[in-house]
Image (tube, rainbow, N blue to C red):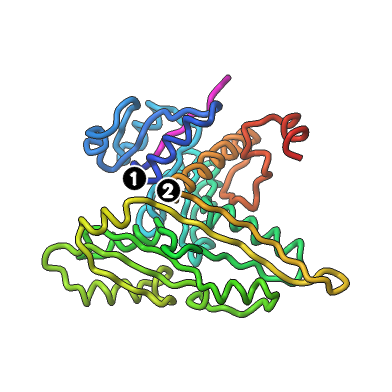
Amino acid sequence: MTKIRVAVVGYGNVGRGVLAALKNNPDMEAVGVISRNPERVRKTFSGLPVMALADTDAWLEALRPDVAILCGGSKDDLPQQGPALCAKVNTVDSFDNHSRIPEYFKAMDAAASASGHVAVISTGWDPGIFSMERVVANAFIPGSRAYGFYGLGEAGGLSMGHSDALRTIPGVKDARQYTHAVSSAIEKVRAGENPEFSAGDMHTRECFVVLEDGADPEAVAQTIRTMPGYFAPYQTEIHFVTQEFLNEKCAGFPHDGLVVAAGVTGKGNPARIEYRCQWASNPEATANVLVAHARAVYRLAGEGKAGAFTILDIPPAYFSCHDRDTLLSSFM
């Protein structure tokens, strides 16, 4: 079997999850880890080449990846790394700032189209799986609205993108952000009301923040509450805690979510579609979806496709390692 060669760009929680996920996909193999700080990575990781992100031409020539999975953050990393790298290699990423996806898509499409590469953007479980479920639910119940809710349990769900955004704030040493769904909003949707929600009507945010020595907590809190695209529209609760408290309370990365749409069919009969997922590890959830999309990237590139794509553009069979006969006999 000719295996799909994958370079893992970034060695944070998602990058480590991708390396674990690749081991469960027999048609794929990791060929190297790319990092801004390869020396730091080498202290805790071995078994594959670890190369510097800045030396793009060198690691592309040495590793010859079919696909690079970009595991950086959406706030600062991917807007820079994405267009630069998809100009040189096929890529897949999990850019998750919903409000900026159209802008990011245009930048990635321009760079990938000009270079003849494939770039699949904004995949994971949301955006990603839930994006597809929203489109499907709306199509199957015309006139309905499909809503996404996250953090359904009492503890909420840990958001990696929002946590990463917190850690970019000057004065923040470490941080975690938990999303909480507003249960009354879910019930309005289930009742078929198709309500007009603002972002803050559906979720609240809870932040646990460790400050650098000498940082001004009021200034940090103001920066958090006014951060566009992440916290500005939401009721946000902020806790300033010690590193020890954060390590103990926020040791895991659980998250879950629900897409729900309700309406009526042709004769006015009530109808509802729901899709639920629960993940004990949010970064590993995103990593598994990224790896499946890397397979789709490889297949699209093999067909001579170029430009940017999302999960909405890709046939589901392209994500699977199974052949068509198996899909028809076992999955239909």
Q: Toward the viewer: 263 or 245? A: 245
**Is 264 on the left or on the right of 130, as rendered?**
right
Residue 4 in the magenta stretch? The answer is yes
**Amino acid at pointer 1:** Gly
Q: Which residues are magenta?
A: 1-8
Q: Toward the viewer: 150 or 62? A: 150
Q: Which mark is residue 283?
A: 2
**Is 42 on the left or on the right of 128, as rendered?**
left
**Amino acid at pointer 2:** Pro
Rendered-image quadrant of the C terminus: top right
The answer to whether 274 is drawn above or below residue 5 in the figure is below
Q: Is residue 26 visible?
A: yes
Which quadrant would residue 301 be assigned to in this image? top right
The answer to whether 157 is drawn above or below residue 46 in the figure is below
Instruction: Measure the C-alpha gap from mark 2 to mark 1.
Output: 9 Å
Magenta region, main secondary structure: strand
Q: Which residue is mark 1?
A: 12
Residue 260 in the magenta stretch? The answer is no
Check disc 2 and report its element: helix, strand or loop: helix
Which quadrant would residue 179 be assigned to in this image? bottom left
The answer to whether 163 is drawn above or below residue 332 in the figure is below
* Residue 219 location (% of width, % of height): 22, 75
Residue at left offset 49%, top offset 36%: 67
Q: Earlier in the sequence, mark 2 or mark 1?
A: 1
Mark 2–mark 1 contact, CB under 8 Å? yes
Mark toward the viewer: 2 or 1: 2
Q: Toward the viewer: 4 or 321? A: 321
Which quadrant would residue 133 be assigned to in this image? bottom right
